Amino acid sequence: MRLRRKFRLSKRLVKLIGLFLFVFLLAGCTDIKQPITAESTGFWNEYIVYPLSWLITEGAHVLWGSFGLSIIFVTIIIRLAMLPLMIKQTKSSKAMQALQPEMQKLREKYSSKDQKTQQKLQQETMALFQKHGVNPLAGCFPLIIQMPVLIGFYHAISRTRAIADHEFLWFDLGDKDPYYILPIIAGITTFIQQKMMMAGSDANPQMQMMLYMMPIMILVFAINFPAALSLYWVVGNLFMIVQTYFIKGPDLRKASATGSAGGAKK
């Protein structure tokens, strides 16, 4: 009973956090047309948008006046700050993968769909997680943290004219990529990063769906928003790909060997 209550509380907590972030971001969107300065008031402006705007602007002063290079630099700083959380997420993902055989046995044992059996399955599953120290919600936290940062980037770029008007490579940071090159790269790198994260796991239908849906969502998102956000996402993805390669090296080599062997067999 205690485990079931804990599981329900955890689900409620995630929903509450999601609702809070939604309201939080909507509040931030109300003054999207107002320039961001050190005098801007409100939690959203003072602690997320202005610090990002300041970091990008100051970085540009150091990096030969290039706001594009500064965005790359700030993105790497943010990813390095999030690195411990991402490592924890990856380890939690690997632990969940290791538990799949035992979870499958539980699903077979409690295969009946009546409420009492499903409650028992939930209890046994949570007991299994607790026994092995696995947090099934650990994978949500990086996404929860990234969303305010991503929207904060959008505000910082849109509300800081010096950034929005700056040209970098073939695009203006404050406008859409005219050739859709960055959105396509963002979609491809998202797919690669997702594929690497799934290496060594038994892909279920939900994971397979996310493998293809997530890159499409990012592609559509990147096409419709300023190119600076696509630049942020691409650099972040490349960082994650390198990070995942070093953390999940054995799983990736095993998956590659299995794929090669399968191909040879055919």
Image (cartoon, rainbow, N blue to C red):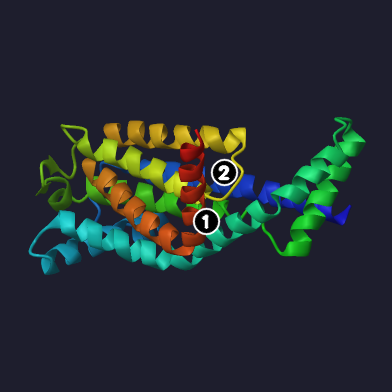
Residue that appears at 46% across and 39% down: 264
The residue where tag 2 is placed is 19
Q: Position of residue 62 (x, y in %)?
A: 13, 69
Q: Amino acid at mark 2?
A: Leu
Q: Is residue 45 visible?
A: yes
Residue at far left of view: 64
Q: Amino acid at mark 1?
A: Asp
**Badge nearest the viewer, 1 or 2:** 1
| Nearer-the-camera pick, 114 or 197 | 197
| Nearer-the-camera pick, 212 or 71 | 212
| Nearer-the-camera pick, 73 or 213 | 213
Which of the 4 quarters of the picture holds residue 77?
A: bottom left
Q: Is residue 86 visible?
A: no
Q: Position of residue 213 (x, y in %)?
A: 46, 32
Secondary structure under badge 2? Answer: helix
Seen in the picture, residue 144 relative to 85 is either above or below; the reply is above
Residue 251's tag is: 1
Secondary structure under badge 1? Answer: helix
N-term mark: 1 or 2: 2
Mark 1 vs 2: CB contact within 8 A: no
Work out how far the residue at label 1 is from the one at label 2, CA to CA, in angstroms: 36 Å
Residue that appears at 87% across and 39% down: 110
Q: Position of residue 187 (x, y in %)?
A: 34, 38
Left or right of 176? Residue 129 is right
| Nearer-the-camera pick, 165 or 128 | 128
